[in-house]
Amino acid sequence: MTADWPILSATIWLPILGGAFVLGSGDRAPNVSRWLALVFAVLTFLVSIPLYTGFDAGTAQMQFVEKAPWVPAFDVYYYLGVDGISMPLILLTTFISILVIIAGWEVIQYKPSQYMAAFLIMEGVMIGVFAALDAMLFYVFWEAMLIPMFIIIGVWGGPNRVYATIKFFLYTFLGSLFMLVALIYMYFQSGSMEILAFHDLKLNLTEQVLIFVAFLLAFAVKVPMWPVHTWLPDAHVEAPTGGSVILAAIMLKIGGYGFLRFSLPITPDASNELDWLIISMSLIAVVYIGFVALVQQDMKKLIAYSSIAHMGFVTLGFFIAFIIMGRSDVDTGAVLGMQGGMVQMVSHGFISAAMFLCVGVLYDRLHSREINDYGGVVNVMPWFAAFMVFFAMANAGLPGTSGFVGEFMVILASFRADFWFAFLAATTLIVGAAYTLWMVKRVVYGEVGSEKVAALEDINGREALVLTSLAVAVLILGIWPAPLIEVMDVSIENLVRHIAVTKL
């Protein structure tokens, strides 16, 4: 289905254009650049809504397709389209971006126009990653994401920001180079750069394994999966609040999206052969990283490790599909696992964004992220405490919040594969509750910890707006996940059918 007007191009280029305008407005009138950034972020969100309202959930075909020659000599096209897997992630990106702009409104005093512009350009590029159907275009957007994030952490970050940015850059860049080699190899095999052409490309097992490993290196670093996760806590601790929100809420999802769009459909046999590797990495992330989170003293580090554990659920949900299909003729369990992984991605986008924003609220007032510097916050900031406790419950996977839905679906599907997978995955609910609630107990409850805490002021209207919007999103998705599951149902069923057929 081709769109009547280029919605996807508008959602990609409007924020990038907005970023250029905001950059041009300069810092002489910082409020002008802030309002300009907000207008562009809201416009982008409004432009992206037709992707949902005009979406046909009954087909697995790409929709809102745009195609124009870009580099004809190499058969590279400007080729965009969305299905039920990418569309929810684009809406998540446009929604979170508004909140990031509002969250940095008063806090960022140093070069605010550049800060806002970096986020707007970042938003456009990330939407480009989700919408690209040409491998070269995907790669350009994929690499372009690094630049604004590099600048955001490197300019507005904490005291060790240079170390964190370089580590973040090197890790993610190294993984991407292997992916580029795999994409070029497939181009020579198929004569086209279209991702959908790669899906149907016949490859023998050796080729598939090598391509799978190349993709794994790129996507595992992005998710991040254990053992290539060490850049994430460093990047989060040093990043400004807005940087942490975008990093946790959207950038990590791009790794998960890569597995669904590339690894599984292009190399189904290799994915089947190596599923044990991904499942083991996911379960180690879920269990071990949960315990690592438990001993953290820095709130941001704790939430960063919690993100790695929650993303372990996502990759587990995707790769148990093969074991389930091997056990039974019915693939409903495989579909359930992948849907659970997708719901978990969107839900984690809201919850991690909210958790980092809560830490940001405290940091803006006290300039400390150490748990020991707080205590008794509820006595002076009751409204804030209510939000923080709610998001902590969602992070622990309380029924009624979105955190529960995805994890429950993945654990249900894990039972179809192996009891011990389900058992290990379910331990995270206990460990997750342990580290999250223990942090809340030490930060929010008890006696007022110090004079500095006694002088804190409750959240203002701007902060309340941001946290309320996320709380509503977490609640709605927790109580009524059907709209999200319906849009991706057919696309995921189609993907499961595709990976069930061998290419050998």
Image: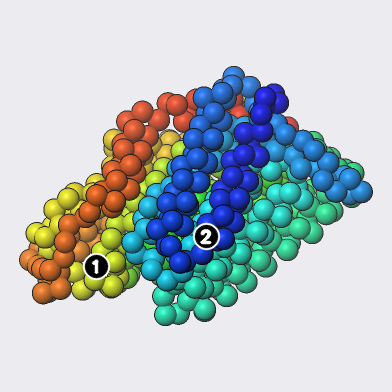
Q: How far apart are marks 2 and 1 (CA)?
A: 29 Å
Q: In which quarter of the image is the C terminus?
A: top right
Q: Is residue 280 visible?
A: no
Disc 2 element: helix
Camera-side residue: 246 or 114? 114
The residue under the point 37% across, 34% down is 477
- When the figure is inspected, residue 364 is found, relative to residue 57, above or below; the finding is below
Camera-side residue: 157 or 326? 157
**Label 1 Cα crowd, 10 Å radius (few <14 / some 14-19 / many 20+):** some
Q: Is residue 60 visible?
A: yes
In the image, what residue type sits under mark 1?
Answer: Arg
Farthest residue to the front: give it. Answer: 28
Residue underneath mark 2: 25
The residue under the point 49% across, 35% down is 46
Going from N to C along the chain, the mark reached first, 2 or 1, is 2
Disc 1 element: helix
**Label 2 Cα crowd, 10 Å radius (few <14 / some 14-19 / many 20+):** some
Camera-side residue: 59 or 435? 59
- When the figure is inspected, residue 51 is found, relative to residue 289, above or below; the finding is above
Residue underneath mark 1: 365
- When the figure is inspected, residue 156 is found, relative to residue 445, above or below; the finding is below
Give the x, y percent position of residue 329: 61, 26
Q: Quadrant of the N terminus?
A: top right
The residue under the point 32% across, 48% down is 466
Give the x, y percent position of residue 364: 29, 66
Q: How many marks?
A: 2
The residue under the point 42% across, 26% down is 482
Picture quarter containing residue 191? top right
- When the figure is inspected, residue 209 is found, relative to residue 67, above or below; the finding is below
